[in-house]
Amino acid sequence: MIGVFIYWGWESSVNLTEETQDGATSSGKAAVASTVILLVTYVAVATAVVAFAGLGTVEEFADDDAILSTVATGVLGSPWDKIVVLAVLTSALASTQTTILPASRTSLSMAFAGAMPRSLANVHPRYLTPHVATIAIAVLATAWYVPLNIFSENFLYDTVAALSLMIAFYYSLTGFACVLYFRKELFKSAKNFLFIGVAPLLGATLLAYLFFRSLVDLSDPGASYTGGSIFGLGLPLVVGLGFLLLGAVLMVVWRVMGNERFFGRRPETVDPEVAAGRTRVPETVGAPPEKG
């Protein structure tokens, strides 16, 4: 699940399609490129650390990212080892952005579709970004992170495990939704069958397996950083399922309040012209018109 978590955010460029020049192709290429870059970076750094420091040293640090600065001192010496510290800080900043950007754009899309309050669909008149949703996500993230970090870092780590559950959950749903949405196009070509059929279905199935397997593993209080439990279940499991349940409750409340624009929609399939790339998908809201 931590492996799922560290790759979270690779799709940020896809969420920014409407704010990208030639978004029909460039954002998808950027998503593929970012995935490859992530994979190469993670594997190369992990291999280099183990090769230089050995498994014994790696085990001593466990989840402590200070191992990078420690190894850097041995490899580069001072003051060049500060470059690695700077790289880690830059990575942390990038991770923060990949948390806010997709969440705010998802909120924008849901608000425009009538699944969330309309105010979240407001777009800044000058910068053409969903400023209300961005501020809302930033405030919620700060309100969650800062108190937890002050209270207990172990509890914060447990929430990361809980977040991994939710990431696997919605990534899996997205994969299954892709197959369903494009189901009438799957057998029109081998490319369609592989890339909008087999690939997303395989990914969704693997993530669903990880999700349910982790439900079992995280139910053990000993699997958490704090060792705490609620109702005899591990803290990460309770937090993760708690937020999923909260989402279900909010969805029911939103349905009871009406909002027929969203709940009145029927199952959809992709327009064949759109799937073939002959017709552009209409912008959601506030997107600048593309040239050409």
Image (spheres, rainbow, N blue to C red):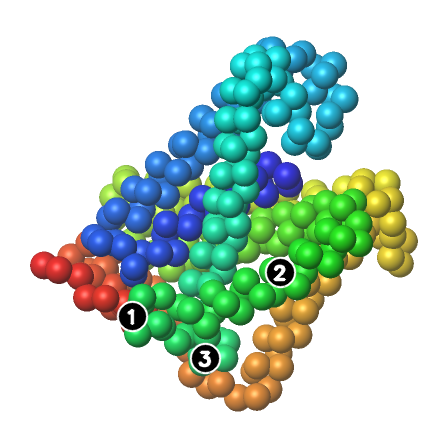
Q: Residue at x 49, y 85 (%)?
A: 259
Q: Which residue is mark 3?
A: 119
Crowding at mark 1 (Cα within 10 Å: few <14, some 14-19, many 20+): few
The residue identified by callout 1 is 126
Amino acid carrying label 2: it is Thr
Labels 2 and 3: the sequence-earlier one? 3
In the rendered image, the residue lying farthest to the left is 292
For marks 1 and 2, give the CA distance. 26 Å
Residue 61: percent from left, percent from top = 73, 25
In this view, 262 is above or below 43: below
Looking at the image, residue 27 sits to the left or right of residue 84; the answer is left
Q: Amino acid at mark 3?
A: Ser
Is residue 113 toward the left or the right of residue 155 in the image?
A: left
Q: CA distance from mark 1 to mark 3?
A: 17 Å
Crowding at dot 3, Cα within 10 Å, few <14 / some 14-19 / many 20+, comes out as few
Q: Which residue is mark 2?
A: 142
Q: CA distance from mark 2 to mark 3?
A: 20 Å
* Above-or-below relation of 23 to 288: above
Q: Assess whether mark 2 and mark 1 are in contact (beta carbons under 8 angstroms).
A: no
